[in-house]
Amino acid sequence: MIGFRNRGNMAQVRKQPLRKCAGCGLMKEKKELVRIVKTETGTVRIDQTGRLNGRGVYLCRDAGCLQKARKSRALERSLKCAVPPDVYDEIGRQLDGG
């Protein structure tokens, strides 16, 4: 057949999932961001694996984005609950250390 190509040998290129940072609003690859999740029990915590069940929001690994998100209350809006100050402190410690 003319124009027929064997596609079985071609390498598949996977698209990286993009997520929007709640602080700066830029779209970045999921692995570049930190996920904050509200679990089914209502607690807000950092999701190290990116796979916890619950409502999630993403932040850049930048202290400036964390401050923007805190000032604009973006995490509260996205998670639809109040975010305690100790959660912001924990996120800040993780950003400084990682």
Image (cartoon, rainbow, N blue to C red):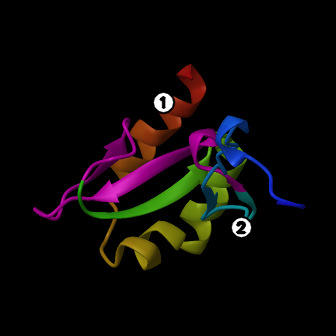
Residue at x 65%, y 61% (from the top left corner): 23
- For marks 1 and 2, the one nearer the N-term is 2
In this view, the residue farthest toward the left is 41
Residue at x 70%, y 43% (from the top left corner): 13
Location of the N terminus by quadrant is bottom right
Is 67 one of the magenta-colored residues?
Answer: no
Residue 78's quadrant in the figure?
Answer: bottom left
Mark 1: few/some/many CA within 10 Å (<14, 14-19, 20+) = few
Point out residue 59 in the picture as x, y percentages from the top left corner. 58, 52
- Quick one: 50 or 90, which is closer to the camera? 50
Q: Which residues are magenta?
A: 28-52
Residue type, numbered disc 2 = Gly
Mark 2: few/some/many CA within 10 Å (<14, 14-19, 20+) = some
In this view, the residue farthest toward the front is 1
Horizontal arrangement in the rendering, residue 26 relative to residue 60 (left or right): right
Asked which secondary structure carries label 1, the reply is helix
Location of the C terminus by quadrant is top right
Residue 48's quadrant in the figure?
Answer: top left
- Quick one: 54 or 77, which is closer to the camera? 54
Residue at x 73%, y 46% (from the top left corner): 6
| Residue identified by numbered label 1 | 93
Residue at x 64%, y 46% (from the top left corner): 14
Point out residue 80 in the picture as x, y percentages from the top left corner. 34, 79
- Quick one: 18 or 67, which is closer to the camera? 18
| Residue identified by numbered label 2 | 25
Horizontal arrangement in the rendering, residue 1 relative to residue 81 (left or right): right
Horizontal arrangement in the rendering, residue 36 relative to residue 53 (left or right): right
Say whether marks 1 and 2 touch (CB < 8 Å): no
